Image: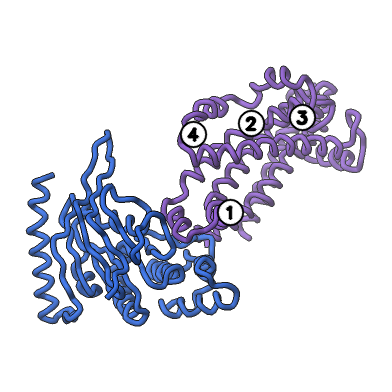
Chain colours: A purple, B blue
Amino acid sequence: MKRSLLSVAGILFFLLLWALGARLVSHYRGTVPFPGPLDVLIRLKALSAGESIYGHTLWEHLASSLSLWFKGLLTGLLVGIPLGIGTGRFETLRHLLLPLLSILQVIPGMAWIPVALLFFGVGSGATVFMITMTALPPVVFNTQAAVRDIPVVFRRVAAMMELSPLTSLWRIYLPAVSPGLVTGIRLGFAAAWRVLIAAEMIVGTNQGLGFSILQARWTRDFTSALAFICLIALFGLAFEKFLFEPLERSLRIKRGLNG
Amino acid sequence: MSKVLSFDAISHWYKAERKRKVHALDSVSFSLEKGSFTCLLGPSGSGKSSLLNMAAGFIRPTHGQISFNGQPVTTVSRERAVVFQEESLFPWMRVIDNLLLALGQSGHNGSDAAREAGRLLDLVGLKGFDQAYPSELSMGMRQKAAIARGLALSGSLLLMDEPFSALDERSRDRLDQELADLWKRENITILFITHSIEEAIRLGSEILLLSARPGRLVKRWDLREAQKKLDSPDFLTLKKEIIRSMELCCPSCRERD
């Protein structure tokens, strides 16, 4: 209770700072007024009521972004989790793929732009590709580490019990790797969310949150731009708060790390 | 009496760093009779755990053969259940689910499995803790639950690898006592590895002493008739004798290393 009160106080303090800063910037620079929190809130309200902006409603932009995000992420998970399990379980495969995966890890998401364009041209395909490539390394490495960290004694108990491969996978190995898996997915989610916005600005279709922010810049509609940024933050936060935190907490409690 | 587990001329080398080979065991032979409580005693590196892991089927001896009820041991089997030194209960399952998973493998199902799980928990003194997660139990209780799981799997043979060595002395004494009682009641065969001479005397119906690396069988004591009270003359004499034997076999082994 006390912690959530403090969080609210922190947010209120930030809004106050924003309002003050906006006034100061507007006063001293004077060219374009810096939108304050209230302006952005009013704009958000109008947009969420269905007002069209850059050819679509706010919800259409949001839906477009979310759908690209999920497509990219899903591809990343479908490729990344098996890769992580494979490289975690088999040493030969790990040594074979480690250099490649390490290279992937150090390439920032945005650097994939030319490759994405060569592969897919301008459009959603390129965006999905960039998201996948960004989400892949954290998913692979965390899954791999989780598989490698399964204690030998668990493997031995599973063998000793003569569990069928399917039962071992379901009752032993999956629960054993699940915290690492969730961490990987969480980091993949966050990385993908950030690169999504950037990708939409450059290689995207004419829709989406990133695209809208860039459009707002050209049209000098900074209130809308900030409204979109707020939306991005809110959605990122919501996934973190209402999906991953409860998930990780329940996993921790089950393992008695945080009972 | 029939032999449950036989070690026949077991020698073992394992690979260490830089392709060095370490001679761990040197033609060790002994067998466990049905219903015996055999304590394997020896200094670190004498190959005690290796012998147990071979009996479990986790590793294969370089030379020699292990037989279980007359059949050569080639794979891991639930009939040779191990109680490990480290924590081995699955932390994401409640105690009861850890047991039920094992019971399901040994042919118990439905209400029969639930009844058997209740009996086993009662047997190891964990009645009422069936819904607890392992993390909610003390170390000693977790090891008791691991013993219950071992019994759920096998029911006739337990391979115990220093199961109480992580416990404080008082808890260990108590668990030793409970294990001794359980062994008498359930007529199981136990191979028990320990560092502690006192624990070995207290628990064992026989003690086998291994030398330092490479482990050789040095001596065997039959304790079926022995007085096991801590201050009895038998106990003290035996303890002195074992200590002397250990001192005799170890310096020479160290020289050879």
| Residue under pointer 3 | A210
**Type of amino acid under label 4:** Arg
Secondary structure at numbered mark 2: helix
Mark 1 vs mark 3, foreground winner is 1
**Disc number at residue A94?**
4
Q: Quick one: label 1 or label 4, which is nearer the N terminus? A: 4
Q: Nearer the viewer, mark 2 or mark 1?
A: 1
Callout 1 amino acid: Leu
Marks 2 and 1 sit apart, C-alpha to C-alpha, by 31 Å
Q: Indicate the amino acid at tag 3.
A: Gly
Label 3 and label 4 in one chain: yes
Chain letter of the residue carrying label 4: A
Judging by the rendered image, the residue that carries numbered circle 2 is A134
Taking the spot 25% from the left edge, 45% from the top edge, the residue there is B13
**Placement of the C terminus of chain B among the 4 image quadrants:** top left
Q: Is residue A8 above or below residue A18?
A: below
Q: Earlier in the sequence, mark 1 or mark 3?
A: 1
Asked if the residue under mark 4 is in contact with the one under mark 3, i.e. CB atoms within 8 Å, the reply is no
Q: Is residue A92 left or right of residue A20?
A: left
Which labelled disc corresponds to residue A166?
A: 1
Badge 2 local density, few (<14 within 10 Å), some, or many (20+)? many
How far from the left and from the top, in percent, is residue A64? Answer: 82, 35
Give the Cα distance between marks 1 and 4. Answer: 23 Å
Q: Are marks 1 and 3 on the same chain?
A: yes
Q: Dot 2 falls on which chain?
A: A
